[in-house]
Image (cartoon, grey):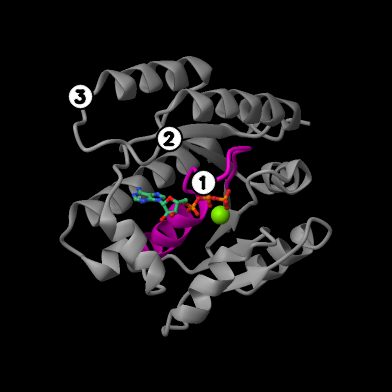
Amino acid sequence: MRTIAFVTQKGGSGKSTLASSLAVAAKDVGERVCVIDLDPQASLLSWRKTRKATDIGVIPANIGKLPAVLKELAKKGVTLAIIDTPGADGAASMAAMREADLNIIPSRPSIFDLWASAQTRAALKTTNSDFVFMLNQCPPAQQSARVDAAIEALEEMGGMISPLVLARVDYQEAARHGLGVTEINPHGAAAVEMRALWSSIKRRLARAATKPATRKAA
Ligand SMILES: Nc1ncnc2c1ncn2[C@@H]1O[C@H](COP(=O)(O)OP(=O)(O)OP(=O)(O)O)[C@@H](O)[C@H]1O
Ligand SMILES: [Mg+2]
């Protein structure tokens, strides 16, 4: 089982939105997915309750239970665990960071988000965990100078994963109905983004697995 975590000190960057649509996109291509909700706001537990299908489990957990929950999921044959974390709770983020094979730090292309991303990166460095940044909620005009500057800043801080995710109504509509964007609009641009994001993450996980010294060396 591989474990990924969405982490960032910044609230509202899109952790829960991306975690839910990515869970569905990965399930679509054969992963057995379980989401672990570490956030007391429980956004993804609510998403699961709205969802009619029982194909993706969502489990609430706290910091103390997280390692045991992950062990249990691996035993049950889950192939991908996705951890959603609260925006401001440093302890929960740190627990997720330590457990994840790959941490994903979503950031909007705004200076406040980029500063928060730098703080998250500093926390990640102390846990010696693998991480990658991604840009979410980018404006539709892709060539904006603001997006270019954000890409440059995140590349300098440790690297970005593709694709750029744009601000799109599909993300909000899918979440509202307990769906992923690949379900609510399978041929839409958001669905294309989420499939591409899962492919990038999968490649990155495979690469990390062949280089064990790059993560969790402690
Ligand atoms: N790509 C996107 N396009 C459009 N809206 C988005 C996108 N990503 C996130 N949003 C919206 O931004 C808001 C914040 O997203 P979300 O709740 O997923 O962030 P979060 O990082 O989980 O926040 P918190 O830290 O509070 O848990 C929500 O209203 C969500 O619908
Ligand atoms: Mg959230």
Q: Is mark 1 within 8 Å of ligand 1?
A: yes
Q: Nearer the viewer, residue 21 or 138?
A: 138
At horizontal 48% and vertical 32% (from top left) the residue drawn is: 133
Mark 3 vs mark 1, foreground winner is 1
On screen, residue 102 versus residue 183, left or right, reads right
At horizontal 27% and vertical 56% (from top left) the residue drawn is: 169
Query: Mark 2: which secondary structure?
Result: loop
Determine which of the numbered discs, if any, sits on residue 12 in the image: 1
Question: On the image, numbered disc 2 is attached to which residue?
Answer: 108
* Quarter of the image where the N terminus is located: bottom right
Asked if residue 29 shows in the view, the reply is no
Q: Which mark is first along the chain, 1 or 2? A: 1
Circle 2/circle 1 CB separation < 8 Å: yes
> Disc count in the image?
3
Q: Which mark is first along the chain, 1 or 3? A: 1
User: Distance of mark 3 from mark 2, alpha carbons?
Assistant: 15 Å
On screen, residue 94 versus residue 101, left or right, reads right
Q: Amino acid at mark 3?
A: Gln
Q: Amino acid at mark 1?
A: Gly
Q: In the picture, residue 127 is in which quadrant?
A: top right
Q: Which mark is first along the chain, 2 or 3? A: 2
Q: Nearer the viewer, residue 81 or 79?
A: 81
At horizontal 70% and vertical 62% (from top left) the residue drawn is: 40
Q: Position of residue 158 (x, y in %)?
A: 51, 21
Q: Position of residue 86 (x, y in %)?
A: 65, 51
Q: Nearer the viewer, residue 206 or 166?
A: 166
Q: What is the span of residues highlighted in magenta in the rendered image?
A: 6-26
* Above or below for 201 versus 28: above
Q: Nearer the viewer, residue 85 or 162?
A: 85
Residue 91 falls within the magenta-colored stretch:
no
Question: On the image, numbered disc 3 is attached to which residue?
Answer: 143
